[in-house]
Structures are given as C-alpha cells and as structure tokens.
Amino acid sequence: MQMIVFECRTGTYVDIDGGGFVHDYIHKHLAASRPVFTPVIEEINVHALVAWTGVDRLYTALLHAPAPAFLVDLDLTLSVTRLGTVLLRFCLRAPGPAREYDGAMEAATLAVADALHRVFCVFPGA
C-alpha cells in the first residue's frame, strides 16, 4: 500500500479559515501531535489542509493510548472543504519488505480515521 483515502461528509458548512473551527480544534486539542495547518487553498474546491508526518503522536492524542511504533512511518493529510467534505489520505513512507500494510496497521489506521471522523463529522446532540 502506498496510499489509502477515506472520505466523509459533515453535512454542513465548515469554517476552514485561519482561526476558524478546523484551525482552532487542531491547535487546541491536537497540538501535541505536531500538525501543519495550511488554511484556505483556492482551487476548484476551496479547502484547508492539515498534515502529520508520522501519525504516532496523533494516535496518542486522539485515542489517549500509546501508539504502535510502526505509525511513525505512516503520514496523514487531512483535507476539509468549506462545503463539508473531509478526505483523509494516509500514506506509508518508504514502503517495502521491512514495513508492509498489515492487519495491525489497518486497525491503527482505522482507529485514527474513526476518531477524526467523530471530530469533524459527528456532532453531539445532532
């Protein structure tokens, strides 16, 4: 596996500006995961990007559990559009015989994807 992409939808407008919901949530609750936030990119779909080099810290921040060591080799780019489409692009850095996408990596990837889905697409009380 070189890349796996998950798509989800918020069902509502999302504030992706610097200082908006995505920026504030990422920097308030996930700062320890060392995200890189790129606000509003004007393309066909206006979106913001949040990138993590290695999702080990993000796993720990979201799940409050120690991350499996192999997550240091898994990168993530989160793309959020104003119209509420959320894309999660997981990419295995330097794939090869030493590190292949296996059941343990699948479980960890799905746990991170599910947690981010809950942050951006599932609203309590909705």
Image: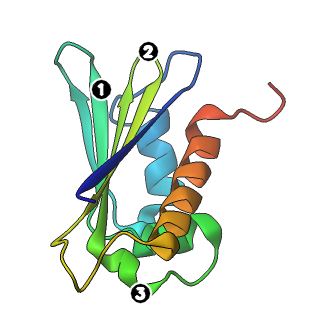
Q: Position of residue 126 (x, y in %)?
A: 80, 24
Q: Which mark is residue 86?
A: none
Q: Nearer the viewer, residue 6 or 85?
A: 6
Q: CA distance from mark 2 to mark 3?
A: 35 Å
The quadrant holding residue 16 is top left
Q: Position of residue 89 (x, y in %)?
A: 33, 47
Q: Position of residue 69 (x, y in %)?
A: 41, 87
Q: CA distance from mark 1 to mark 2?
A: 9 Å
Upstream in sequence: badge 3 or badge 1: 1
At label 2, the amino acid type is Leu
Residue drawn at point x = 48 percent, y = 61 percent: 109
Q: Is residue 36 above or below residue 8?
A: below
At label 3, the amino acid type is Ala
Instruction: Decide: few, some or many residues near mark 1? Use Cα within 10 Å; few <14, some 14-19, many ≥20.
Output: many
> Seen in the image, is 70 located left or right of residue 38?
right
Q: Is residue 78 above or below residue 40?
A: below
Location of mark 3 (residue): 69
At label 1, the amino acid type is His
Instruction: Decide: few, some or many residues near mark 2? Use Cα within 10 Å; few <14, some 14-19, many ≥20.
Output: some
Q: Which mark is residue 47?
A: 1
Q: Of tags 2 and 3, which is closer to the observer? A: 3
> Seen in the image, is 88 located left or right of residue 46?
right
Quadrant of the rendering where the N terminus is positioned? bottom left
Location of mark 2 (residue): 83
Q: Position of residue 121 (x, y in %)?
A: 60, 33
Secondary structure state at the residue bearing disc 1: strand
Residue drawn at point x = 50 percent, y = 71 percent: 103
Upstream in sequence: badge 2 or badge 3: 3
